Amino acid sequence: MIIQTGYAQTFSTYYDNTNGGGSCEKLLRTPNGNFVHLSGYGTMSQLIFTDTSGNFISGKKLSHPCFVNPKGFIYSKYDSSYVMLCQGNSTLTPVLYSKLDKTGNVTWARCADYSSSETTQCIGAFPNGELVFAGGGCTARSFIIKTEVNGNFIWQNQYIDNAIAGSIITDIVAHPDKRITVLDNTIISGSYHIGVYQLDSTGTVLWYKRYESTANKLPNQIISDSTGFTIAGSYSPDHATYHSFFMRIDLNGNLIWFKGYNDGTDNQFVNTAQLDDHSYLFSSQNSIAYHQTRIDSSGTILWNRKMKFDYGVGPMAGDINGYAICAGYYKSAGNGIRPWTSRVHRDSVSFKMVFCSNIFIL
């Protein structure tokens, strides 16, 4: 693997009023047990704060181009802030990142002057407040930017493997000791595969693993614990229909197990959350319905439930006492796309939707 340093050309504060487009949603559990939802809606984004029962507490509009098409959203314990990563639209420099205080007020907004072909994907925060951003797109190579607490560059690298046609980072883990573990979607001979590599605090590669097979694999998320990593995403054995998969690797990237979840339909993975008993709840969706599935720490299915057919499913967040919060969107007659949240329990016997809250557009 080749590391190309100094890849972004300039660094600046961004205050353009041009409108953008796109929509998506992120979900975080706050330190006090409440939840904050980040929703992209047309030419703006919005933060919505709710309690553990889904009741509205407060909201904040983010209505300029720095906040169009959100891609990443994390909580930084260092200064009790939120850090947001956005894509922007096709006419704007796309590596846009900003810091918000705990009530949603903007502290600063920054951009990195990459080419218009870059795609930002994910963000991480270290205990000392340093930040890391990742993505790809320019000549299909991956990039990582590390900044200090105020968003100023520490280093910026592009990661190139000449043995593959291209790659893009889909998720990262920012470890307390400043290592970075990277989940990479690599392209080899027209097929998509999984790549994982780990960097030290300076961006130097410590190890690199590629997991190839005859099936297309699109990795979405990587979750770290004390013994290794769990990776989740979609795979396609026929390069036509997609199904969910989970895989487990050790701390050095060696494969422990891989499990595919094929129910015979085109049911693509969307999101997962680790629950407080170390099991996983994940969502998947097709044109007929969305599903929720719970698996144990070895990938064995504990239960599967078919949910509403007209709801789009999005992010999840683990809660306490066996619960998880799920979020998504639904199409409201006359009101466009509107976000929703629900709280569900892990127990297969007493499984129930505790609440489903229709969160309004501010």
Image: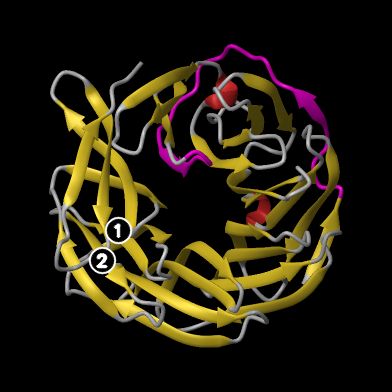
| Numbered badge on residue 125 | none
Residues at circles 2 and 1 in contact by the CB criterion of under 8 Å: yes
**In terms of secondary structure, what is the magenta stretch mainly?**
loop
- The picture places residue 2, in percent across and down from the top left corner, at 81, 68
Label 2: few (<14), some (14–19) or many (≥20) C-alpha neighbours in 10 Å: some
Tell me the quarter of the image containing the N terminus: bottom right
Q: Which span of residues is magenta-colored?
A: 6-32
| Residue 114, quarter of the rendered image | top right
The answer to whether residue 162 is above or below residue 275 is below
Amino acid at circle 2 = Thr
Amino acid at circle 1 = Ser
- Residue beneath label 1, please? 283
Q: Residue furthest top?
A: 17
Label 1: few (<14), some (14–19) or many (≥20) C-alpha neighbours in 10 Å: many
- Seen from the viewer's position, the closer of residues 193 and 343 is 343
Which badge, 2 or 1, comes first in the chain's sequence?
A: 1
- The picture places residue 121, in percent across and down from the top left corner, at 57, 48
The answer to whether residue 259 is above or below residue 50 is below
| Residue 38, quarter of the rendered image | top left
- State the residue at coordinates (62%, 50%): 137
- State the residue at coordinates (80%, 54%): 157
- Seen from the viewer's position, the closer of residues 56 and 22 is 56
- Residue beneath label 2, please? 293
**Does the magenta-highlighted stretch encompass residue 297?**
no
In the structure shown, which secondary structural element does the residue marked by tag 2 occupy?
strand
- State the residue at coordinates (13%, 54%): 288
